[in-house]
Image (tube, grey):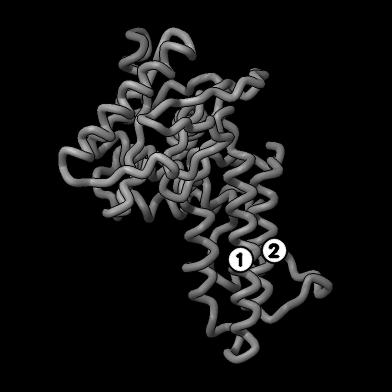
Amino acid sequence: MRCANLHYDTALLVFGKTREAALAGLEKATKELFHYFASNQLVANASKTSFFVVRTPREKVDTNYMLQVGQSTIIESESINLLGVTITRNLSWDTHVRNVVSSLRSNNGLISRITTYVPNKMVTPLVHGLIMSKIRYCLPLFCDVRQSPSDPISSSMHDLQVQLNNAMRTVSGVKLEDRVEVSDLLLQVGIPSVNQLAAETTLLETWRQINLGFPTGDCFVFRNEHTSDRRTRNAEKNLLVTPSPGGAGMANFLTQGSSLWNMAPAAFRHETDLNKAKQIAKTFCSSLPSF
């Protein structure tokens, strides 16, 4: 929900034993929130309020629910954009990735037009500001990290890498038909591939959650805490229990974060300084598959 006067976004998350119960709770909470806004001389715009009822990716529910707020009836949305992240009601990241790819394609066009007036290599910083930052944002939640060359390449990671390749070719002054290897472009521009960036951001976010006391840190379980018979063997290794693969978003992050943590050098797992941890993670992730 957006408060029109302050352009302030507010998000509500309501749980219920049934969809109807959750919807009733959301309707009640929304009315209370709108009342709070009015009591504090804030204006909440019902026409800019959106909601959805969460489904699982495999669940087929054709019903479009409605929310009654005052005199306004709000129809359920397919997706909601929250802080630049597109969240769909079936918890799929496909729409978000398509939006990111579309934005990257537009930014690549801008970089290409700039090179008409500025030498190609001079616009290299734009790759960091307009391409890498877009890819990096929220990446640990939807990425599929390839930890070995035998791992499959997901379509979303492939699409992101294609846009990064286009940006690198532009600033390097080469064309697709020149058949310059992507690995050579990465070295020339001095950036990681999408896969390496995904591994690095996931690994560092795991470090932050564990070492900085963030709430999600409690979801990571050390092996010596999980089962007593491993206490002596793994106490010094600082290894995590790796959840079973499956799920999306947070579940995917926990699985990949735990796996990468266990693969990382022992120096990283025991490092308490963020800057030093970044350097170790960067070196380690550069050894993972480029694409």
Q: Secondary structure at mark 1?
A: helix
Residue at position x 39%, y 45% from top? 204
Taking the image as drawn, is residue 238 in sight? yes
- Please name the residue shown 81% across and 75% down the image: 178
Identify the secondary structure beneath mark 2: helix
Residue 266 horizontal side relative to residue 288, left or right: left
* Of the pair 245 and 63, the residue shown nearer to us: 63
User: Is 281 in front, or is 251?
Assistant: 251
Q: CA distance from mark 2 to mark 1?
A: 6 Å
At label 2, the amino acid type is: Val
Task: Give the side of residue 177 with respect to residue 170, left or right.
Answer: right
Query: From what the image shows, is residue 12 above or below residue 8?
Result: above
**In the displayed structure, would residue 179 be above or below residue 268?**
below
Q: Position of residue 157 (x, y in %)?
A: 64, 47
Q: Is residue 97 above or below residue 75?
A: below
Residue 182 bears which disc, if any? 2
Residue 222 appears in view: no
Residue that label 1 marks: 186
In-front residue for pair 44/262: 44
Mark identifier at residue 1: none
In the figure, is residue 197 to the left or right of 165? left
**Residue at screen point 50% across, 46% down:** 139
Residue placed most toward the observer, 101 or 65: 65
For the N terminus, give its image quadrant. Answer: top left
Give the image location of residue 66, x and y in percent. 51, 25
Q: Residues within 10 Å of mark 1 (few under 14, many from 20)?
A: some
Residue found 46% across the figure and 50% down from its top: 84
Tag 2 and tag 1, C-beta contact below 8 Å = yes
